Amino acid sequence: MSIKDKPQPSRNRQIANILFLLATVFLAANLILPSLFGSQIPRVPYSLFIDQVQDGEVARASVGQNEIRYQLKGEENQPAQVFSTTPIFDLELPKRLEDKGVEFAAVPPPKNNWFTSLLGWVIPPLIFVAIWQFFIGRGGGVGGPQGALSINKSKAKVYVEGESTKVTFDDVAGVEEAKTELVEIVEFLKNPQRFTSIGARIPKGVLLVGPPGTGKTLMAKAVAGEAGVAFFSISGSEFVELFVGAGAARVRDLFEQAKKKAPCIIFIDELDAIGKSRASAGFYGGNDEREQTLNQLLTEMDGFAAGDATVIVLAATNRPETLDPALLRPGRFDRQVLVDRPDLAGRLKILEIYAQKVKLGSDIDLKAIATRTPGFAGADLANLVNEAALLAARARRETVAQADFAEAIERVVAGLEKKSRVLNDKEKKIVAYHEVGHALVGALMPGGSKVAKISIVPRGMAALGYTLQLPTEDRFLMDEGELRGQIAT
């Protein structure tokens, strides 16, 4: 990713900074500096002031609401001293001053300073405007800092051309049928004339359906990596907010950004978060936030005519039965692509991809590992390879051995080994009889799987032992006898 220069501050911002500096200096000159450098009059207690009046030392006094300033009778060739005191409620003070011949007068109430009045009217609105501008400045678009006013902005992560996801179809294995379907999407993005010249129309939406961990998100990234176009990735839950209307606004913002970067791909992960059927019990009226978001998504997907920008919507879900029927009709998600768990050959290819990232020993047999992992999805196999590598590193070996993969399979299938849960001899005997019974019944029943291991080592939360039976091939159907055998085992 190329490093872009930081944006320089705009001329308006520079002018605003200068005005702010001048305003600060002006306030300091009018409010702070006079109090710091003005003349300081000594303050004395009120009792001392009364004593000086009684002794005839006071020449004149100015009586105010908050302060009394008075001047003492000075001697010849010496300046008179001025003091101040805080007044108290004293009705006898005027009579005392008059009896002693003190020249006194009342200070008129202070006039409102025009500058202070102006500040009282101007400062509060300026503070409000400054806070408003602060939040607007933080409310950036996609990839920028998210402020309070960015609630209607899409939170999609954008991978533009030149900043590719670096994932191709070579990184995806075990789902060859789904890969074949999506190659057509890539061909349309690269060479749309091949389809439009004969009047064909590419599906506007492709829904990837399958169990968790089968590689739906990875498949979508591979489509973007192969096509070399902008790729918007967002989760369905990121559309829904507490604020009413935020989800619909984010959908509009997402599609507006996508049109500007067309041709491009929008990928919505976990579509069922916003695409649930409107007839379900979770909705209680037309103002529901998720329903508004869904309606906006339906509108945006219907808005791409043949002459509009090429924007293809990919979505993934593992709960297609909960989706609204309007999403699945032709013109929106025209095509549903099943991304299922891989078969034996697919598991072997997936293991070969992930095994390239670790150092393997000479005794590794990936085909045997693939045979022992029926029903494992791509994410399960990736975790299996990582667990084996961690076990090898824990044993301080430089390469991963076949035994590490065997232990990793047991950790994934049966749970972690509980070495602290020690059984006595009687308990071990009971558990051994129990597990051998599983193995014997399983071997005698029709369609029984091959026993790979019998263990009386406690694993997981409750298992005191286990019998590991692994099928020799992928099975998709079982007859009545095999089902009864499974129940008996």
Image (spheres, rainbow, N blue to C red):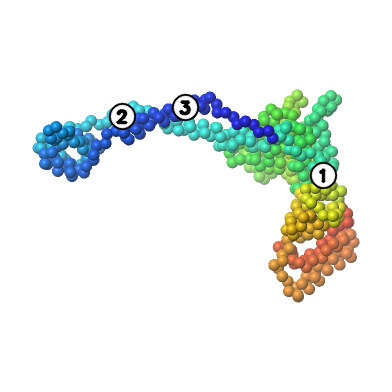
What x and y, as percent, mark residue 48? 17, 43
Residue that badge 3 annotates: 18
> In the image, which disc is placed on residue 462?
none
- Which secondary structure, mark 2? loop
Please count the marks in the image.
3
Left/right placement of residue 338 relative to residue 234 reads right
At 84% from the left edge and 55% from the top edge, which residue is drawn? 362
What x and y, as percent, mark residue 368? 86, 55
Give the mark toward the camera: 1 or 3. 3
At 72% from the left edge and 32% from the top edge, which residue is drawn? 162
- Which secondary structure, mark 3? helix
User: Neighbour class for label 2 at 10 Å: few (<14), some, many (≥20)?
Assistant: few
Residue that badge 2 annotates: 112
At 33% from the left edge and 27% from the top edge, which residue is drawn? 114
Q: CA distance from mark 2 to mark 1?
A: 82 Å
Give the amino acid at mark 2.
Answer: Asn
Give the amino acid at mark 3.
Answer: Ile
Q: CA distance from mark 1 to mark 3?
A: 61 Å
Asked if residue 239 can be seen in this view, the reply is yes
Nearer the observer, 437 or 61: 61
Q: Earlier in the sequence, mark 1 or mark 3?
A: 3
Q: Is residue 449 above or below residue 222?
A: below
Q: Is residue 317 above or below residue 395?
A: above
Return the residue found at the far bottom. 426
Q: Earlier in the sequence, mark 2 or mark 1?
A: 2
Residue that badge 1 annotates: 173
Give the amino acid at mark 1.
Answer: Ala
> Residue 235 lies in what quarter of the image?
top right
Q: CA distance from mark 3 to mark 2?
A: 29 Å
What x and y, as percent, mark residue 255? 68, 31
At 73% from the left edge and 61% from the top edge, which residue is drawn? 416
Give the mark toward the camera: 2 or 1. 1
